[in-house]
Image (spheres, grey):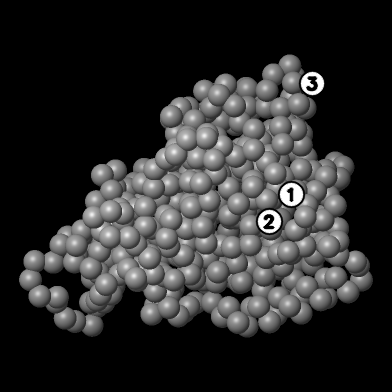
Amino acid sequence: MTRVVLVADTVYLGDEAGTALTRAAVEITDGTITAVGPLTGPTPVGPDIVDLGDQVLMPGLVNAHTHTPMTLFRGVADGYSLLTLEGWRTVVLPLEQQLSTDLMTAAVEVSLAEMIASGTTYFADQYFAVEAYDSVVRSSGLRAELAYGIIGLSGRETREASLAAAEAFIENAPLDPLVHSWVGPHAFFVDNQLENIEAEMALAMNHGIGLHTHFGTSGAEDQVCRERFGMGALAMLDRLGVLDRPLILAHANTVDQEGLGLLSGRPVTLVAAPSVAMMSGAPPTPVRAALDAGVNIALGTDSLSSNSADLFEEMRTLGKVATHEARRPSVLSPRELLGLATWRGHRALDTRSDTSNGRIVAGAVGDLIALPAASLHRGPTGAQTLEAALVYGASGFNSSTVMVSGRFLKRDGELLSVDLGGAREKRELDFERLTRSQSVPV
Ligand SMILES: [Zn+2]
């Protein structure tokens, strides 16, 4: 049995009431939170007691949409919209066509290290050739859902090879309590046509897993579906049964009220990536309307246009962009924004159990982070709520402590499971090798 007790001056539970306990302790046993409560006497002392002092202990953050190998390309897409097929074809595809699997691992390590460094404990990845780097993910100690990317653009043979590779990865994935497989169609109807979608559904159903895809970045799939099938893309996906499986729809910028009606109460999550939407000139994901319609919604960084792994920055950006779009203040409360980045992310990714994960409560997974109170730059406590200070004042990179399933991945500000400096150096050489024979658009 492994047991650790974290003590902090402030423990933010992440529950519906937004409870923050003063000077409280959280016990984690074998990876699960087993007790939470205020300290009534002096702080106990022992080898398994960690007193964090004047820090805010809170649930770890969930990045519900990213592509970890793509930090290799960070910067090359500046000035392009990656939310259009044209942008992706112009900037990313030429590099990906040259990308051998040995060039992926250092970039993945950089992504993992940056996520841990900024307080992310759980993420959903989508990329092809996941078998090249899933062992790197496993050794990082992060919790992850790895979707095997399937692109259906280049003819029947390539499409079938891509599906076969996804199937082999899913079938051969080792049983792991922290890392699981998903099916990752790149984009329905844009580059994955009906035949692919049916095969992807069958694969997901056979293995009891979900699908993670891009959706509604430009409205292209709606246009295709209206022309070919006489209905919108979500109505078509509903007809195919896709909306009854666990499903992550990343971006969802063009989903309208009718679409939200179809998604209400289904096991589907929309993932807002506000920095990418802003930098690509795309409309903001309809987060307020989705919450009001009873559709689960989570938060993701995506990978290229957004240059930071910090989900605090994404929460803050989403809060501001939602208000800016609506032309009225406080469209999304800090508590709602924290919910997107914590328990709603767990609800999206962990489809195997109906739990209280993403909150600090007995029975939930021991995925926790701590930030020094001073790093929040909080106003007078009588004036600014803790939640507002976390959303609008915090940087995840100031976290001192990051724990997944009871294991410290960052402690006293130091990364323990990934060598960020070494990975950065190797990524530098990898990029040089990748681009030696071609010019990179700038
Ligand atoms: Zn993406």
Q: Assess mark 1: CB under 8 A from ligand 1?
A: yes
Label 3 to label 2: alpha-carbon separation: 31 Å
Q: Which residue corresponds to the image point at 77% horizontal and 62% vertical from the top-left?
A: 76
At numbered mark 2, what does the secondary structure look like: helix, strand or loop?
loop
Disc number placed over residue 275 in the picture, else none: none
Contact flag, marks 1 and 2 (Cβ < 8 Å): yes
Question: Residue type at mark 2?
Answer: Ser
Residue 32 in sight in this render:
no
Q: Which residue is mark 1?
A: 82
Q: Which residue is mark 2?
A: 305
Contact flag, marks 3 and 2 (Cβ < 8 Å): no
Which quadrant of the figure has residue 83? Answer: top right
Q: Earlier in the sequence, mark 3 or mark 2?
A: 3
Looking at the picture, tell me which residue is in the foreground, 1 or 227. 227
Label 1 to label 3: alpha-carbon separation: 24 Å
Q: Is residue 436 above or below residue 234?
A: below
Is 402 left or right of 149, judged from the image as shown?
left
Question: Residue type at mark 1?
Answer: Leu
Q: Assess mark 3: CB under 8 A from ligand 1?
A: no
Q: Which residue corresponds to the image point at 23% horizontal and 55% vertical from the top-left?
A: 382
Q: Which residue is mark 3?
A: 227
Is 166 left or right of 265, judged from the image as shown?
right
